[in-house]
Amino acid sequence: NEWKCLDQDSIVVLNHPNWGRNFDHFPHTLMESLEDYHGIEIYNGVIERLQGSPVATDRWDRLLTSGKRIWGFGNDDSHAPEDVELAWNVVRVAENTPDAIMSALRHGSFYASTGVEITDIQVSNGEFKVETANAQRIRFITKFGIYRQTTNGSSATFALPNDERDAQTLSYVRAECYGEGGRSAWTQPIFFDVI
C-alpha cells in the first residue's frame, strides 16, 4: 500500500497481470490497492509462448470500473529474437522529442497495438470516432467490460451519453479494433465526467 509514483519524470506500468498458470502474476487486489500508477500492460507479447494470457483487458476493465484512471499499454517483453514487434504503443505528439513522447504516455495520448493501425481518434459533437487503416471490426466497451456496440469495417462512431445518468451508467468508453490474423489495437478510455 505504500508504493506510489512520486517522481514526476517516471512512468509506472503494472506488467503482465495474466501471466502464469493461475493467470494472476500481478494479484488484482494489489493492483486495486496501489495508487498513482499510469497504467497496466493490457498486452504482453512474450506470453504468447508462455503460460497465461497475453491479453489483460479483463483486468483493465475491472480497474476502470472501480474508478481507476489508468491507461492500457502493449509491449513485446523481448527475451528472444522472436519476441520483437509483437506489441507497441503509438503516441500522438506534435513534435518527436523524448519530453513530448513521455508526456503523451503519461496523459493517455496513445494507443496500444499488435498490428492494427489507428489513423484518427476524435471526440467531438457528442461522438467518439475511431478510424483505422486495416481493422475489420471495431467494438466499443464501457463499464463492467460491456460491449456496447460492434461495427464491421475500418471506422466506427459511438454516440456519447447526453445526460448525467447515462454518463454515470457507462462511466467510460474505449475501443478495440480487430484486424486480420488476430491483430488488434486498443484506444485509451474516454471518461464521461471530463468530456
Image (cartoon, rainbow, N blue to C red):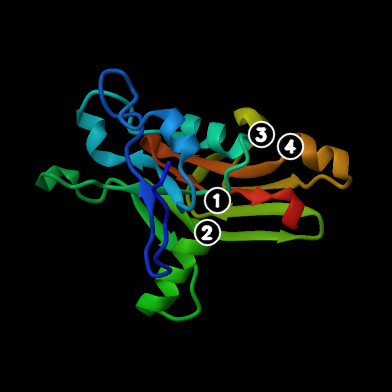
Q: How far separated are the C-alphas under marks 1 and 3?
A: 13 Å
Residue drawn 32% across the image and 37% down it:
16
Residue situated furthest front in the rendering: 2
- Disc 3, SS: helix
CB under 8 Å between discs 4 and 2: no
Residue drawn 61% across the image and 35% down it:
66
Q: How far separated are the C-alphas under marks 3 and 4?
A: 5 Å
CB under 8 Å between discs 1 and 2: yes
CB under 8 Å between discs 1 and 4: no
Q: Is residue 117 visible?
A: no
Q: Earlier in the sequence, mark 3 or mark 4?
A: 3
Label ID, residue 18: none
Residue 29 spot, x, y in % from top left: 45, 29
Q: How far separated are the C-alphas under marks 3 and 2?
A: 18 Å
Left/right of residue 29 with respect to residue 85 in the rendered view:
right
Q: How far separated are the C-alphas under marks 1 and 2?
A: 6 Å
Q: How far separated are the C-alphas under marks 1 and 4?
A: 15 Å
Task: Give, as a three-letter code, the residue at label 4.
Answer: Leu
CB under 8 Å between discs 3 and 4: yes
Q: Earlier in the sequence, mark 1 or mark 3?
A: 3
* Position of the C terminus by quadrant: bottom right
Residue occupied by mark 2:
108
Up-down: is 155 above or below 28?
Answer: below
Residue situated furthest left in the rendering: 80
Left/right of residue 170 with respect to residue 23 in the rendered view:
right
Task: Give, as a three-letter code, the residue at label 1.
Answer: Gln
Residue 174 spot, x, y in % from top left: 60, 44
Mark 4 is surrounded, within 10 Å at the Cα level, by few (under 14), some (14 to 19) or many (20 or more) other residues, namely: many
Residue occupied by mark 1:
188
- Disc 2, SS: loop
Task: Give, as a three-letter code, the residue at label 2.
Answer: Gly
Residue occupied by mark 4:
170
